[in-house]
Amino acid sequence: MKILSRYILKQVMTGFLLVTFSLLAMLWLTQSLHFVEMVTRQGLPVCLFAEMTSLLMPRIFNVLSPIALFVAVLFVYNRLIVDREMVAMQSAGISPVRIAQAAIIAGVLLAIFNVYVMNWGIPSAERTFRDLEWRVKNNMTQMMLREGEFTTLKNGITIFIDKHEDDGSISGIFVRDEGNPEKQVTLTAEKGRLIETKNGPRILFINGVRQEIDKKTYKFNSLAFTRYSAEFNQAGGTHKKNQTVRERNFFELMNSAHDKSLSASEARRNIVEGNRRIIYPLYNLLYALVACVGLLISSFNRRGQTRIIAVQVLSMTLICAGDLVLTNLATRSLYLLPLLYLNILLPFGICLYLLLFYNPFYFYHRSAKRKMQNVL
């Protein structure tokens, strides 16, 4: 790599990292607000809170990466023009392709990295995140059951615990179950213990009383026991949900048409997601080209490159909007799937044509020659 390309590439990557980390920090704060309630009300440990929110970062980075690279390339190349560095390069006979080499290298590197993120990073993070989320929301652990406080679960169960013992047991237990509309159950026990099972958490009650009232007949039943076990899963004892689209690997997505457990709409959504894992990393390269080509083929203007930059931002916005629209349409009909490839290949071809075959100096000198002839 030549010194010129290294010089521009260093500035582009520095700008990309600054923009990416700034946007990631803001979005991390926004996403973390959804988990604040778990920390304040359910006593979720801060380390677990940090782990859950950090698992969202690969998904967010994948979305931000092309946009952040577009901003960085646009800023760096515009600054080269403002500082007259671009004029010096062009006057020295350096071609636009040579000047755009740094942006192309940055786009290729990030495209390769995004292939890894989309096909390995995001599925692994999504699986870990869903496991943690399911465990926190559905498992009744000691961090959810605080001493001397009434804890109301989502399925209409209220639990009170007097004290957590040093040996892991609990004492002074009161449970009121109003989840069944036909009857109301109340359990009290001197001691107990939390037990984790495959179907969810259970409480083993020791030396207590179970009282039941039929709400229709108002019949009252009471049972004294020495040992009694009951399940109090917030999700009603349901198991974990099936894999989401983000959790599946590339080969599972592309072979979804043969998966009988998926509906037709789910299979189409998986196939579209599989194709997006091929297409979307290339947007890093495309946006880098869109950001630099306009500035490279335009003539120098002392008043700035406002119009060119506006056209570049509009082009990037239209490409991004086209990707979103065509993705939704392709999930309804796979016959529209080639349009997703066309949305990236068409502007990519236009950028390459302008970069390779459009000579701004030819048109500039031709225009100047005409003006000179008119004056004479």
Image: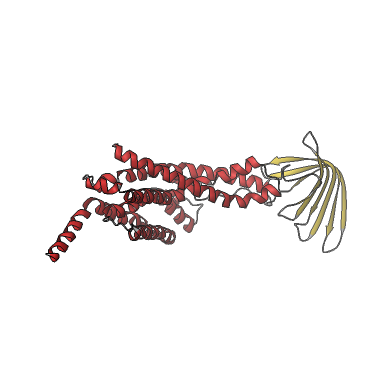
Nearest the eye: 334 or 300: 300
Give the x, y percent position of residue 77.
34, 49
Tell me which residue sits at (76%, 43%) in the image. 203
Residue 290 seen in render = yes
Report whether 339 appears left or right of 176.
left
Give the x, y percent position of residue 137.
66, 48
Residue that protrudes farthest toward the bottom in the picture: 374
Report whether 213 appears left or right of 274.
right
Q: Assign the C terminus to one quadrant of the image.
A: bottom left
Number of callouts in the render?
Answer: 0
Nearest the eye: 323 or 158: 323
Colour scheme:
secondary structure
Give the quadrant of residue 346.
bottom left
Q: In this view, does 261 lie above or below 311?
A: above
Nearest the eye: 110 or 220: 110
Q: Is residue 317 above or below residue 123?
A: below
Give the x, y percent position of residue 145.
75, 45
Q: Assign the N terminus to one quadrant of the image.
A: top left
Residue 358 seen in render = no
Nearest the eye: 38 or 10: 10
Report whether 347 appears left or right of 93.
right
Residue that protrudes farthest toward the top in the picture: 167
Give the x, y percent position of residue 120.
47, 41
Tell me which residue sits at (82%, 64%) in the image. 216
Residue that protrudes farthest toward the front in the picture: 376
